[in-house]
């Protein structure tokens, strides 16, 4: 009995002590939570270290919650566009029709023109019963973009490898560029590069890399329609090139008005840009000019007038940098958006269209009158007389004729010949028309001009993003760090 009582007493004492300790701990916890001294009450031994750790954690959480959004750097935007442009350049284009690469696709506007051209050929092909695959084969054949069996070693001939490299390289950059907040124009350029690449991949594998998806007889009756579509395609590419050059001029104008150019280095830097601009014009037009001296001498006058006009424009621009008069800067901006190259090239283009249309009408009327129903005896049958795919001289754009022999009256033929050679010389004077409209005998010249065009695009893009780019209002999401 005594033993049982003693045991019960001990148990009661232990329970009482435990309850008292629990109550004391609870009160200490409550009071510590009220006055912010948890570690001092609960862990008096390491109070200073625990307090420092707690304050550091609280400060870290506050910084993470209140940190400002990270803007998109100029390097991030520029390298994303460069990667997408190089990816688009790995495909061929009707703008320059080179063998492997297409430097002309370094411009997003040329990529947009390629997409429009593909849709145009697809619409007309399906309308004539060729189907999607047949239309794509027809487009690549008529534009001179078909591969031959010797090209089987190219990477683009293996779909799995093409997609693999695309996923590893350009796709993350495209996601980063499009996923940012702000940068509307940068995202638009990235979307054009990406969309043009996807469209060309679909066209390439739909048309069959080396084996046509249909018989050649299915497109034998569409020669006239193909000639018309080639000329319309050239017009779209011309608009893309003209717009791209206008963007270059806009970059030069904006650079001249930036704060960096209002320092003592304003005139030397603007002079450097002027030298680069003139060198580009000169290297683009000089080979064609020298080759055509004996063909059309007034082309030299046109070319010199073009150089003088652009020189005067740049001189006025440099003058406006120094703030001599406000109206000079306004005048230079107005001239930038209506440059002489676009003005004169457009005038030549429209004039040759009208003259050619009148010439065709004149030729038909002469034949109807029965003056002569046979072609001229001295009409040459040389390959240069044929309007090849991609030739696209301004005098040929309105022609229903695909060969000079179609001009049945000798007077009409000779007038056409003079107009054709003259417009060819004039077109080559304007560097705007030098890239996509060269015949097949000048592949090397087209290659040099197209590569120069790509380098110029890289130069002006770098100038814009390194000097003019403003990251204000842009946000780079944190998840884009997972893409590199």
Image (tube, grey):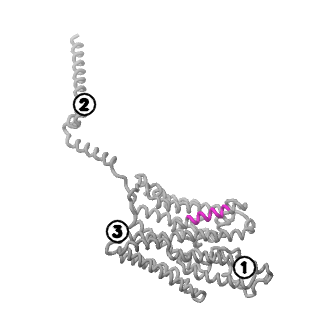
Check the image and name the residue furthest to the right: 370
Quarter-of-image position of residue 298:
bottom right
Disc 1 designates what residue? 362
On the image, the x and y values in percent for residue 339 come to 49, 74
Of 267 and 382, nearer the camera is 267
Task: Nearest to the eye among marks 2 and 1: give it.
Answer: 1
Is residue 158 visible in the rendered structure shown here? no
Point out the stretch of residues depicted in magenta: 112-123
Is residue 316 visible in the rendered structure shown here? yes
Q: Residues within 10 Å of mark 1 (few under 14, many from 20)?
A: some
Disc 3 designates what residue? 259
Tag 2–tag 1 contact (CB < 8 Å):
no
Image quadrant where one finds the N terminus:
top left
Task: Nearest to the eye among marks 2 and 3: give it.
Answer: 3
Residue at disc 1, secondary structure: helix
Residue at disc 2, secondary structure: helix
Task: Nearest to the eye among marks 3 and 1: give it.
Answer: 1
Q: CA distance from mark 2 to mark 1?
A: 105 Å
Q: CA distance from mark 2 to mark 3?
A: 61 Å
Residue sitting at 55 percent across and 86 percent down?
290
Quarter-of-image position of residue 28:
top left
Of 168 and 76, nearer the camera is 76
On the image, the x and y values in percent for residue 418 come to 65, 84
When the figure is inspected, residue 226 is found, relative to residue 299, above or below; the finding is above
Q: Is residue 120 magenta?
A: yes
Residue at disc 3, secondary structure: helix
Mark carried by residue 30: 2
Of 306 and 186, nearer the camera is 306
384 left or right of 452? right
């Amino acid at each position: 009995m005594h033993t049982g009582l003693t045991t019960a007493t001990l148990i009661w004492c232990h329970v009482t002590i435990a309850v008292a300790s629990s109550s004391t701990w609870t009160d200490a916890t409550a009071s510590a939570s009220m006055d912010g001294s948890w570690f001092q009450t609960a862990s008096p031994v390491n109070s200073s270290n625990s307090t420092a750790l707690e304050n550091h954690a609280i400060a870290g959480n506050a910084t993470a919650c209140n940190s400002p959004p990270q803007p998109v750097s100029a390097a991030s935007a520029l390298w994303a566009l460069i990667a997408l442009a190089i990816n688009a350049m790995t495909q061929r284009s009707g703008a320059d029709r080179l063998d492997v690469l297409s430097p002309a696709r370094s411009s997003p506007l040329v990529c947009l023109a390629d997409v429009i051209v593909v849709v145009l050929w697809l619409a007309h092909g399906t309308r004539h019963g060729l189907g999607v695959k047949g239309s794509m084969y027809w487009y690549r054949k008529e534009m001179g973009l078909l591969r031959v069996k010797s090209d089987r070693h190219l990477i683009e001939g293996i779909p799995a490898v093409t997609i693999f490299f695309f996923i590893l390289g350009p796709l993350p950059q495209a996601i980063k560029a499009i996923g940012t907040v702000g940068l509307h124009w940068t995202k638009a350029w990235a979307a054009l590069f990406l969309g043009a690449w996807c469209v060309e991949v679909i066209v390439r594998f739909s048309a069959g890399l080396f084996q046509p998806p249909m018989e050649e007889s299915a497109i034998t009756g569409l020669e006239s329609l193909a000639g018309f579509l080639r000329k319309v395609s050239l017009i779209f590419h011309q608009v893309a090139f003209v717009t791209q050059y206008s963007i270059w001029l806009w970059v030069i104008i904006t650079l001249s008005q930036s704060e960096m150019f209002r320092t003592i280095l304003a005139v030397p830097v603007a002079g450097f840009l002027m030298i680069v601009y003139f060198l580009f014009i000169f290297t683009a037009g000089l080979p064609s000019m020298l080759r055509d001296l004996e063909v059309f001498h007034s082309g030299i006058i046109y070319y010199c007038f073009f150089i003088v006009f652009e020189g005067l424009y740049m001189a006025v621009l440099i003058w406006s940098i120094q703030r001599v008069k406000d109206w000079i800067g306004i005048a230079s901006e107005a001239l930038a958006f209506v440059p002489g190259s676009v003005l004169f090239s457009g005038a030549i283009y429209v004039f040759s269209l009208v003259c050619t249309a009148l010439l065709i009408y004149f030729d038909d009327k002469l034949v109807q009158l029965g003056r002569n129903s046979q072609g001229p005896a001295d009409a040459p049958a040389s390959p240069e007389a044929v309007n090849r795919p991609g030739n696209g001289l301004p005098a040929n754009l309105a022609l229903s004729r695909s060969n000079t022999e179609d001009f049945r009256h000798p007077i009409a033929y000779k007038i056409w010949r003079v107009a054709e050679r003259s417009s060819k010389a004039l077109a080559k004077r304007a560097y705007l028309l030098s890239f996509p409209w060269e015949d097949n005998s000048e592949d090397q010249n087209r290659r040099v001009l197209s590569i120069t065009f790509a380098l110029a695009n890289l130069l002006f893009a770098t100038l814009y993003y390194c000097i003019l780019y403003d990251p204000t209002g842009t946000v780079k999401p944190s998840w884009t760090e997972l893409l590199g």
